[in-house]
Image (tube, rainbow, N blue to C red):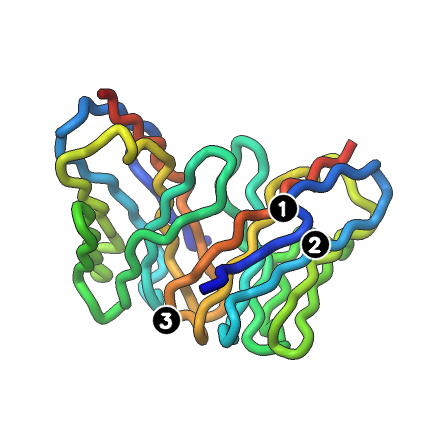
Amino acid sequence: GAGVSQSPSNKVTEKGKDVELRCDPISGHTALYWYRQSLGQGLEFLIYFQGNSAPDKSGLPSDRFSAERTGGSVSTLTIQRTQQEDSAVYLCASSPSGADNEQFFGPGTRLTVL
Amino acid sequence: KQEVTQIPAALSVPEGENLVLNCSFTDSAIYNLQWFRQDPGKGLTSLLLIQSSQREQTSGRLNASLDKSSGRSTLYIAASQPGDSATYLCAEVGNNDMRFGAGTRLTVKP
């Protein structure tokens, strides 16, 4: 069946512009996760959704980052006024329910801020 | 601060060798521990998931163990192959978040 999909696969933007990254989880998965991996660094957890709600948003790097999920399915990660340090691969994952399930990852979106 | 540490950071072995990758964590209230592999330019592939109530999981040539009391997990790879070359990440899953180690970069030489 279809896995987690993310779009776009690559995004190049100018500093100061806003970007929106999209994640389509596996159908029926209620839990959705956003991560980023910066060059030369480990994977960083950003935010977790259970259904449409995110219990903890403290992992978001700054107030320029926001995420939403509607209809318990698609999620968007928005970065406002992008900075060069936002350049990274942004990964999305979904799991059937909560923390006790295996996570399935999408291919990621490579964001480059010039 | 809760952390996940992976040792070694890099490992190079000849084909056919058995090897062990180590992961240690500080959160005693984990829900589960998950091992992934990451190939260059690609997303993560889940390898094994160990629930907090379990001690090990096996899939093919891979075996992962979990010892919550000591805060350790190991990934054992038997009869390594060049196709096993990748970065291996462990992650411990808490209530609302997930913490990853920095990974072990494995190279299996033909």
Query: Quadrant of the image for the C terminus of chain B?
Result: top left
Task: Tell me if label 2 and label 1 are in contact, CB under 8 Å.
Answer: yes
Q: Nearer the viewer, residue A74 or B28?
A: A74
Residue B108 point in image, percent of width and height: 25, 26
Q: Mark 3 belongs to which amino acid?
A: Asp
- Secondary-structure class at tag 3: loop
Q: Which residue is mark 2?
A: A21
Residue occupying image coordinates x 13% and y 29%:
B16
Question: Closer to the camera: disc 1 or disc 3?
Answer: 1
Left or right of residue A22: residue B8: left
Left or right of residue B48: residue A47: right
Give whichever of discs 2 and 1 has the lower sequence position: 2
Residue occupying image coordinates x 68% and y 75%:
A70
Whether labels 2 and 1 belong to a single chain: the reply is yes
Chain at tag 2: A
Residue occupying image coordinates x 65% and y 65%:
A75
Q: Which residue is mark 3?
A: A100
Q: Which residue is mark 1?
A: A109
Q: Is residue A26 above or below residue A59?
A: below
